[in-house]
Image: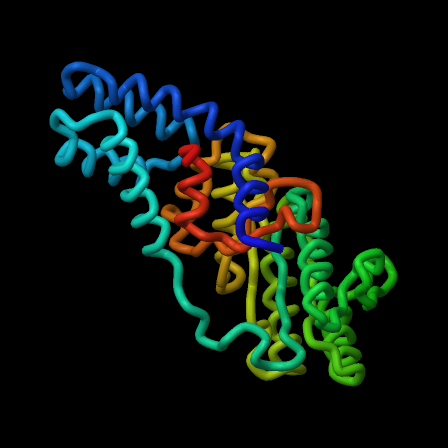
Amino acid sequence: MENSSLFQRLRRGLAKSREGWAGRLESIFQTQSWDEESLASLEEVLLSADVGVKATQRLKDAANLYIRGQSVQELFSFLESEIVHILKERQRSPVIPPLSQSPWVMLFLGVNGVGKTTTIGKMAAQYRQDGKKVEIWCQNVGAEIIKHQSGADPSGVAFDGIRAARKRGTDVVLIDTAGRLHTKSHLVEELKKVRRVVAKEQPGAPHETLLVLDATTGQNGLQQAKVFKEALEITGIVLTKLDGTAKGGVVIGIQEELGIPVQYLGVGEEIEDLQSFDPDRFVQSLFGR
């Protein structure tokens, strides 16, 4: 899909966030005198948008040094550039180029209800559109299924999935995992076991370990993420349901608090609404540029 179309989808998906904080920021920036009260108002807006304590403090400190008599447009541009800078700090090039090994194994983490299985289905469909052979749970998007009966050992399912993928010449294996946080210790050990089995069957795997979080849960998502971070090294975050919240700043907050790059955004129901994360495009959409 063309970049212009993807950009429009992102803008539509961030409409609630854009309407929620752009107007409030403008009223702050139009104040005649920039003082402690103005800084406190800026802090309030950023925190209410779920930008997070760490990122909010960084932006507040930078604003205090920069803002002296600039126009509203200049102030918006300044804030945009600072947010892009924060977001790009966490972005990093993969150690192994994507899809450079076959099968390319991706492990998905997340509690039940965050949109994990839906995300996997969309990603499988996108890979299929690119001509890749994919194995995952979602047959309706053209991917083959490796599935055991309910209650089966998750690591056994992962083992069979990778073994079958190698025999069939599959390009990509997407592995769903359990997400029952009320049994934290059991979940952590289960995920560690899945990872060990995957690595044993396919050296270097999992090549990506993605944590799926629901943007509408705000700070609760951070607490969930910390549990999963205890269990496995997470390479990236998938933030879903951004179209359903006015707190798009959660993208900034989660990345800054966890030190893990956001890699994908979910901004709607369609396959194309799962997008690779681009800091510049995200901030432009967030501010309505």
In the rendered view, tell whether residue 92 sits above or below residue 289: below
Of the pair 231 and 173, the residue shown nearer to us: 173
In the rendered view, tell whether residue 239 sits above or below residue 286: below
The percent position of residue 62, horizontal first and vertical second, equals 19, 38
Of the pair 284 and 17, the residue shown nearer to us: 284
Q: Residue at x 37, y 56 (%)?
A: 90
- State which quadrant residue 59 falls in: top left
In the displayed structure image, the side of residue 175 where residue 149 appears, left or right: right
Q: How is the image coloured?
A: rainbow
- State which quadrant residue 88 falls in: bottom left
The percent position of residue 243, horizontal first and vertical second, equals 59, 35
Quadrant in which the N terminus appears: bottom right
Of the pair 118 and 122, the residue shown nearer to us: 122
Q: Which residue is drawn at 59% across and 81% down?
A: 101
Quadrant in which the C terminus appears: top left
The percent position of residue 109, horizontal first and vertical second, equals 61, 56
Q: Residue at x 71, y 72 (%)?
A: 132
The percent position of residue 171, horizontal first and vertical second, equals 69, 76
In the displayed structure image, the side of residue 129 where residue 97 appears, left or right: left
Q: Residue at x 25, y 25 (%)?
A: 72
